[in-house]
Structure formats: structure tokens, C-alpha cells
Amino acid sequence: MSPFVRNLGIVALLALVIVALNLETSLVTASILLQVAFVLALAFVAYMFWRDFGRREISLWPRRAQIVFYGAVAVLVVDLGWFMLGSLGGLEALAFFVVAAACGYAAFRTWRDAHRYS
């Protein structure tokens, strides 16, 4: 038996157990907990990267550049939180992508300007 067929059988068996024992609620709860854990892991990695590398470099930038960069990151964090907490559609999804692109552009442009003259 090929590994692909064996793995499909395992997945089918797990799906059958979940449906037979009416464990959909538990599965949804576990899914939500895994999503929260994933977001926290991403936040932790971003914080560690900033603490080890970014903080020293950004502290050397002009004050205006620091405010723009940290402001863009803060607005992006709020935008991502809004995206993760609600289901976006239509104009809300468009607003999410426009705000994310504007924040990314502002942060990148500030970073690039800070590195251009050093």
C-alpha cells in the first residue's frame, strides 16, 4: 500500500471518529486555540527579532523616522487584529488590504531612507 493511500485512510478514520462521537465542537475549540497559539508565536518571534536587531538600529534614526516606523507597525497590528477577529468581505476586505499596503509602504520607505545616507 502506498503511503498516500495509507495517510488518506488515517484521515478518513479520524473524520469518521469525529463525526460518530459528535466531537465537532471540540474540534472547533481546538482550532481556535491553535489559531491563537500561532498568532502568539508569530508575535513572540517578531518581538525577539526586534529586540535583538531592530531596536539598536532604529534608535539611531531621526525622531520623525522612528515615529513614522513605529506608527506604521502599530496601525498594521491593529489592522491584522481586525482581520483576525472578524470575517471581512467587500469594502472591509478592501480597506484591510489598503491599510496593510499603506503601512508596509510607510515602514519600508522609512527604513530605506534611513539606510540611504548611512
Image (spheres, rainbow, N blue to C red):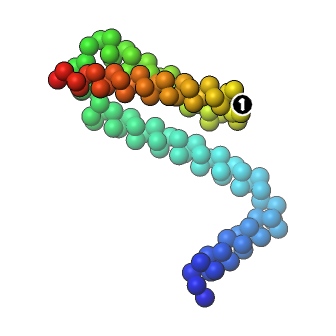
**Outermost residue toward the left?**
118
Q: Residue at x 33, y 11 (%)?
A: 64
Looking at the rendering, which quadrant does residue 105 occupy? top left
Q: Specify whether 104 is left or right of 10.
A: left
Q: Specify whether 26 is left or right of 44.
A: right
Q: Residue at x 53, y 41 (%)?
A: 39
| Residue 78 in view in this figure | no
| Residue 19 in view in this figure | yes
**Outermost residue toward the bottom?**
1
> Relative to 85, is 9 above or below?
below
Looking at the rendering, which quadrant does residue 73 occupy? top left
Residue identified by numbered label 1: 90
Amino acid carrying mark 1 in the image: Gly
Q: Residue at x 62, y 33 (%)?
A: 83
Place of residue 111 in the rendered image (x, y in percent of width and height, measured from the top left): 31, 25
Q: Nearer the viewer, residue 118 or 18?
A: 118
Image quadrant where one finds the C terminus: top left
